[in-house]
Amino acid sequence: MAREADARHGGENPTERPLAPGLYIVATPIGNLEDITLRALRVLRGVDRIACEDTRQTQKLLSHFGIAVPTVSCHAHNERQRSDELIASLQAGARIALVSDAGMPGISDPGAHLVAQAVAAGIPVIPIPGASAVVSALAASGLDTASFLFVGFAPPRSGERRSFFEKFREGPATLVFYEAPHRILEALRDAVEIFGGDRRAVLAREITKLHEEFLRGTLADLEKSLASRDLLRGEMTLMIAGNDPSQPAYTAPSASLRERMALCLAEGLEEQAALKRIARERGVAKSEVYREWQREQGRRK
């Protein structure tokens, strides 16, 4: 038991000890490879086998960090069958890491069944924390974080999705869910119908990646902004403010175009790319923002 406790909580020299037998639930980066933790790397190097949502995707991560450990697939279509094999190995004293393509396994990703089976079999299950789209998006959203409800993916069909939204319309907690790029506009339109167009919302896209973007405003603002785009890409996390009648109606941020441009340019964006982003945030044509920027530049001369 002392060895298991060391594996869970560390000690004076955790890197010098072999890993204890058990199932290690390892969070992996959701975009930026620098978000891998030192502990995650140590565990991935020290286990006997790595169970992956997609072995090809995980191999890219392992190759990047020079990790040569055997992998085996454990995804949505084979998890129940694969679990029997993995549980048998764990009961024999194996050390197995479970990873998904990105983020924490079992959170809107495969892994929950294997974890439940391991717990039922009395096998130690050790979480290795790391990147999470839910927490990262929520922390930067500007919405209430004291109480939130993560509901995974909304149903893909409009009727079912609206019924799904109905269950949370009066709740006070911030609602957080994932959505696919090809369904996000339809989801926003359904959300406007159920929650109302003036409900505050934030859409986080491509978190930790090169084109990371946060769109803030009302649900109607977000719908208008996305409807003006030709192509929608990237992993998306939509957050909708909870129902709070005491809160005043949402008003757009008061930051000037000059202040917003300064922030974009500080991120390394070129001027034209910055103007395009701001136009998307405001839900207006790029030419309108460009003319305002030209006037702003003229005033500064």
Image (spheres, rainbow, N blue to C red):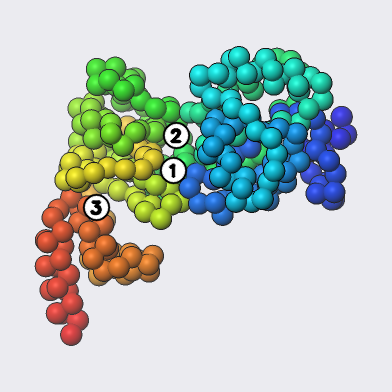
Label 3 or label 2, whichever comes before in sequence order: 2
**Which labelled disc corresponds to residue 290?**
none
- Mark 1, Cα crowd under 10 Å, few <14 / some 14-19 / many 20+, is many
Label 1 or label 2, whichever comes before in sequence order: 1
Q: Which element is circle 1 on? A: helix
Relative image position of residue 256 (x, y in whole percent): 23, 65
Q: Quadrant of residue 79?
A: top right
What quarter of the picture does the N terminus occupy? top right
Reading the image, the residue beneath label 2 is: 148
> Can residue 127 be seen by looking at this rendering?
no
Horizontal arrangement in the rendering, residue 269 relative to residue 103 (left or right): left
Q: Which element is circle 3 on? A: helix
Q: Nearer the viewer, mark 1 or mark 3?
A: 3
Label 1 or label 3, whichever comes before in sequence order: 1
Determine the residue positioned at 15% across, 79% down. 299
Reading the image, the residue beneath label 3 is: 281
Residue type (three-letter) at the residue carrying disc 1: Leu
